[in-house]
Amino acid sequence: MRIITYNIRSCLGMDGRRDIVRIARLIRDTEADFACLQELDDHLPRSGFRFQAREIEGATGLRMIFQRTIDLRLAGYGIAIGTRHDVEEIRTHSLPSQGEPRGCLELRVGTPSGPIHLLCAHLGLSDEERVLQ
């Protein structure tokens, strides 16, 4: 079983280019069973009003479960878990934060080896904030 975690920075590469195809290809090429992703855009102008979780889902074959941690009504920003297995339960958690809202996405997933719990979080930047979270 392969699990990856990746802060995709709204698909902004180190070269300054925003390229969802490149990010999806990288995720797909890992052949991961689970991908825990942070900083996905949901219809934000900077990413062309795209719902990045759905596009990554289509390009990787992973079912993406998205949690919006910053809600701007018609748009937002958040985290996601992609999986090749059956999702049995989804729970979302708000984490204490001193600035930007943070969250943790929890899935119970059925696998051939039995159910597992998988958590994906996007923690704050300061040591104090991380201790609270």
Image (cartoon, rainbow, N blue to C red):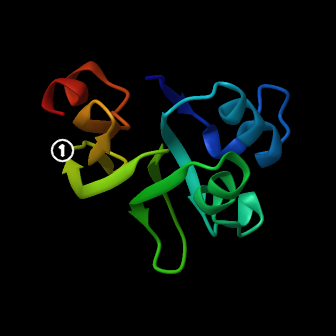
Q: In the displayed image of the protein, which residue is found farthest to the top? A: 127
Total count of labels: 1
Q: Is residue 120 above or below residue 61?
A: above
Q: Give the percent coordinates (x, y) of residue 111.
A: 33, 38
Looking at numbered disc 1 in the image, what kind of residue is underneath it? Pro
Q: Quadrant of the N terminus?
A: top left
> Which residue is at a point 62% across and 55% down the rendered structure image?
57
Query: 79 left or right of 95?
Result: right
Query: Quick check: can you spot residue 41?
Result: yes
Q: Depth check: 38 or 90 in front?
A: 90
Check disc 1 and report the residue beneath it. Answer: 96
Q: Position of residue 40 (x, y in %)?
A: 56, 50
- Tell me if residue 48 comes above or below residue 63 in the rendering: below
The answer to which quarter of the image holds residue 92 is: bottom left
Residue at 33% across, 45% down: 99
Q: Nearer the viewer, residue 67 or 27?
A: 27
Q: Position of residue 19 (x, y in %)?
A: 82, 44
Judged left or right of residue 128, residue 64 is right
